[in-house]
Amino acid sequence: MALPHNVWAFVFGIMGNIISFVVFLAPVPTFVRICKKKSTEGFQSLPYLSALFSALLWIYYAMQKDGSGFLLITINAVGCFIETIYIVLFITYANKKTRISTLKVLGLLNFLGFAAIVLVCEFLTKGSTREKVLGGICVGFSVIVFAAPLSIMRVVIRTRSVEFMPFSLSLFLTLSAVTWLFYGLAIKDFYVALPNVLGAFLGAVQMILYIIFKYYKTPVAEMTTEKSKAVSDHSIDMTKLTTVMPTPVSDTAVHPPHAIQDVPDSQIQVT
């Protein structure tokens, strides 16, 4: 193994591995719930399939860097292992329709898609050109994954509630993006640094939204909440036999793959 070119690259790489490992463990409560109920309920498999595909891409990209990408390989290898466990558990407890759709996406994206990228890069590109092509693919997919939190932020703004956007998750995702951004700058790798600029920005926006809607609710929002509660109480009083059942929360509303229940795991991005 070749050591990083400088101490800062090594420090940020180790920090990135540790923080990203925590992020990868984010869906554990979800799968504890799935195993206990022996059902995937309303959860979706796409975040885990996307995280696995992203980890595979970054491992393949790092392998082109002649040893300087070792710290990228370590965390994404761990990510592949963890995401594979999630996917196996999901398929095990999913109903027939969900299981079939999950297997289709797994085959098309993670097997055929990744295999096609490897074949094209191996036979049609060489040296630095291959690294540039792979880097472009990794950046493009990372941007798509990092854009996923936009949906949950829209929900927060519309509902004025941070119920489905835990601050701790937003914090760890931001720290992960910032750490890998500095790692990319330290090793002078544009493809590692660029997508994490977007990740750090969106993570910071999430934390700002959390603070605004958690601690600085507007009078209108408070009046709306009180009115809704009054209507709800009245309805319960008028219909004694009615039971209000909680709606299962899907992974696209909860979390997210470079990791935390939870907002969409699709937020999880290691690099």
Image: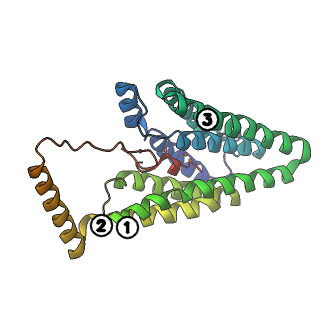
User: What residue sits right under mark 2 in the picture?
Assistant: 213
Residue 132, percent from left and from top: 79, 55
User: What residue sits right under mark 3 in the picture?
Assistant: 77
User: What residue sits right under mark 1 in the picture?
Assistant: 157
**Which numbered circle lies on residue 222?**
none
Q: Amino acid at mark 3?
A: Ala
**Discs 2, 1 touching: Cβ within 8 Å:** yes
Q: Residue 77 occupies which quadrant of the picture? A: top right
Frontmost of labels 2 and 1 is: 1
Q: CA separation, marks 2 and 1?
A: 8 Å
Residue 136, percent from left and from top: 74, 56
Left or right of residue 261, residue 108 in this image? right
Name the residue located 75 percent from the left edge and 36 percent from the top edge. Answer: 112
Relative depth, front residue between 61 and 118 = 118
Q: Amino acid at mark 1?
A: Ile
Let me know if residue 82 appears in the view. Answer: no
Helix, strand or loop under label 1:
helix
Helix, strand or loop under label 2:
helix
Relative depth, front residue between 207 and 114 = 114
Image vertical order of residue 236 relative to residue 111, above or below: below
Residue 209, percent from left and from top: 37, 66
Q: CA separation, marks 3 and 1?
A: 36 Å
Q: Residues within 10 Å of mark 2 (few under 14, many from 20)?
A: some
Quarter of the image with the N terminus is top right
